[in-house]
Image (spheres, rainbow, N blue to C red):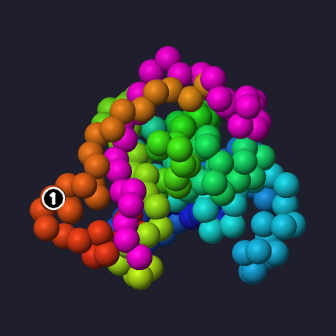
Amino acid sequence: FVSDEYGPYIYQFDRATGQRLRTYTLPDSFAINNLSANGATEISGNTSGRVANKGMEGLAITPDGKTLVGFEQSPLIQDGGDGGQYNRIVTIDIATGATQQFAYNNKIGSKNYNSSEILAVNDHEFLVLERDGKGLGDASLAAVKSIYKVDLAGASDVSLLSGEAALLAKAPAKTLFLDIRSALVAFGIPASQIPAKLE
């Protein structure tokens, strides 16, 4: 299973042959109407859907092999876009293709961060990588590289909701699992040497 953030799309491939077996249909709210090879043009030309270059970045599969869990790198345009507080996690039933959406709070302290990766612990708990774009490769100092744990058990499906205000009360609590930056610095790796785009 492979995610492509520019659609965004999710595909299933045969591992042995490389043949694409299936394309999963994502909710219409994730798509944009006006595509462009220029990111700024694409962003200015759309009022909803994924932000240019920040679509379905993370993809996980639950240990029971029944559900794919996709994660947008940043909030959808209609939910505040890049820099917005509430991102979306979309679950996909592998057998039927049925989807559900859940809100995720990107805020750490007083700032909102993008998310690069998601890992399924079980069918309802997930580890999410949140990060800034600072560090090695950016000629700056890494400030935020953290893994948070979120539990979707009992969380509300937000498929029919739009906008930060609507998602505000629906995002389940998250807890810090690992502060990667602090752990690496404590191990003797300077913040300037921590990869900017840890993924």
Q: Position of residue 39 (x, y in %)?
A: 72, 75
> Within 10 angstroms of label 1, few (less than 14), some, or many (20 or more) residues?
few
**Residue 180 image position (x, y, % from top left):** 27, 55
| Residue 160 appears in view | yes
Q: Hey, which residue is sitting farthest top in the picture? A: 154
What is the secondary structure assignment of the residue under circle 1?
A: helix
**Left or right for 118, reference 42:** left
For the stretch drawn in magenta, the main secondary structure is loop
The foreground one among 166 and 88 is 166
Q: Nearer the viewer, residue 91 or 169?
A: 169
Q: Left or right: where does residue 145 sit relative to residue 41?
A: left
Quadrant the C terminus occupies? bottom left
Please state the horizontal and vertical placement of residue 158, each as a whole percent of the image.
67, 29
Residue at image x 52%, y 65%?
20
Whether residue 45 sits left or right of residue 22 in the image: it is right
Whether the magenta-drawn stretch holds residue 151 is answered as: yes
Q: Is residue 137 left or right of residue 107?
A: left
Residue at image mark 1: 186
Q: Residue at x 13, y 67 (%)?
A: 188
Front residue of 191 and 14: 191
Residue at image position (76%, 74%) is 40
Residue 28 visible within the image: no
Q: Amino acid at mark 1?
A: Ala
Quarter of image, res 98: top right
Q: Residue at x 78, y 46 (%)?
A: 78
